[in-house]
Amino acid sequence: MRDIILIVLLITCFLGGTNCLAKAEGWPIADGTFIQENLLISWDDETLDKEMAYIKELGMTYVIFAPTAMGQGNDNYLTTLYPTKVDGWLEKYPGKDLVERYFVAAKKAGLKVILGLNFNDLWWKKGGGDSKWLNDQMELGNKVAKELYENYYSRYQDTFVGWYYVWEIDNISFKGKAREKALIDAMNIQIDYLNELDPNLFFMFCPFMNANLGSKEGYRDFWIRVFNEVHLRPGDIFAPMDCVGGGGLNLNNFRDWFQELRKAVDTKPGLLFWSDTETFDHTDWTSVPIGQFVEQMKGAAPYVENLITFAYTHYYSPNVTDYGFHQTYLEYVKTGEIEKEPPEAPYNLQMMELPDGSNYLLWSEGEDNIGIAGYIIYRDGRKVGRTQIERVGSSGGFAKAYKETARLKSGRTYKYVVRAYDFAGNLSPESEVLEVIAK
């Protein structure tokens, strides 16, 4: 089966030129998304089915669920999101098999599942500095894989297509020969076991990079060395995060990093190169406008075979936020175009002081053809904040207000302006200027 899948992927790439992610219409779209535990446990089956239908509507193929088990500290103690029989491991939600629910919903929608293994937060402290700990974590992951495979594969053979390696590899934690070797040895412990368990299930991993901690050439050479030693097989997937939403890279330089990583992937015959496009802004954990999401996909598209995202479901789904995000992206999927009509300017700008002494900037909403996604606030010509439409289940509606947190100098006059942006990212004209004399 693995060989058949790989042949189909390679033929598709050949027919489509160098970029097999380009659909017949000629523009890149996301082919999969993560759905993590916090959403799955909060949704009933009807909501989960709706989510899978949204994903299918967008032309996606894959859903990724990870992690399925979480380690605690140095101990071999795991909490799992599925029924476990291993001594010392506990189900996090007794009687609620989240993995089963995931498979049932994905199969119903005709989607393919990539299943993540274990994780431990000590990864961020230990990394390659404790090879024994790292190897032990890989052995734990192999036990998780064995249980997951025995529990689900026979019933979901057409849905279960691959494994996701939850451990995120960056361009600083594994510098030096000893740490690099620790990573290679650890990955081989996992990959060799998974290949023996079932060679038809591919292996996917999503590293990240930070331009402030190294160079694109250095990261390219790191992966060339790792690919030479790690037992990755044809059809396995290298899917680095684009690191625009999460930081480390930006819209101006991330293409350069993908260009160099393409060179590294080309040294490993049969290895597939995907991009994990980020849908959020880590500075305030808001959803980036659809226009930026599309720009990120288009930027990576010349270098990769496919695109997945972290995570459409968590930042654009109608089950999570306003339908306007989904509506705007769906129109792009169908037409290849992002709507260009900007919102009207906010108006009636005013500053209100509450009894507790806090100051709030308030305004009225202008019109937009689809809807307002958020507002950007400027003080004396500089961007100082942003508000965005409330997420589903939050405490209120869309509050058109901004709390001024800066320490203002008494007697000084400050000038405030607000601009609206829609779900595509189109900016309104500026509001009228509000002058405030600080008390």
Image: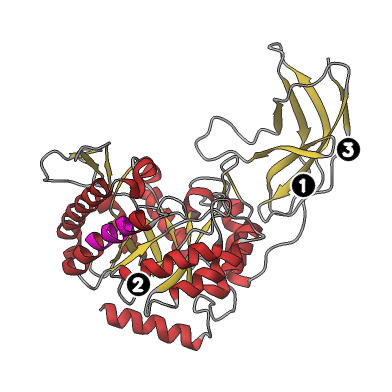
Secondary structure beneath label 3: loop
Report the residue marked by disc 1.
367
Q: Name the image quarter holding the C terminus.
A: top right
Depth order, front residue of 285/37: 285
Q: Earlier along the polypeptide chain: callout 2 or callout 1?
A: 2
Report the residue marked by disc 2.
228
Q: Earlier along the polypeptide chain: callout 3 or callout 2?
A: 2
Residue 154 visible from this viewpoint: yes
Give the left or right position of residue 41, taking residue 212 as reference: left
Pinpoint residue 361: horizontal percent, then vertical percent. Answer: 76, 28
Rendered image quadrant of residue 404: top right
Q: Kindly report the distance in space between the C-alpha atoms of the residues bearing marks 3 and 1.
A: 16 Å
Q: Is residue 304 above or below residue 247?
A: below
Depth order, front residue of 342/203: 203
Rendered image quadrant of residue 382: top right
Mark 3 residue crowding within 10 angstroms, few (<14) / some (14–19) / many (20+): some
Pinpoint residue 280: horizontal percent, then vertical percent. Answer: 56, 49
Q: Kindly report the distance in space between the C-alpha atoms of the residues bearing marks 3 and 2.
A: 60 Å
Report the residue marked by disc 3.
432
Secondary structure beneath label 2: helix
Residue at horizontal 52 percent and vertical 85 percent from the top: 16
Q: Is the magenta stretch mostly helix, strand or loop?
A: helix
Choose mark 3 or mark 1, whichever is in front: 3
Residues drawn in magenta: 181-189
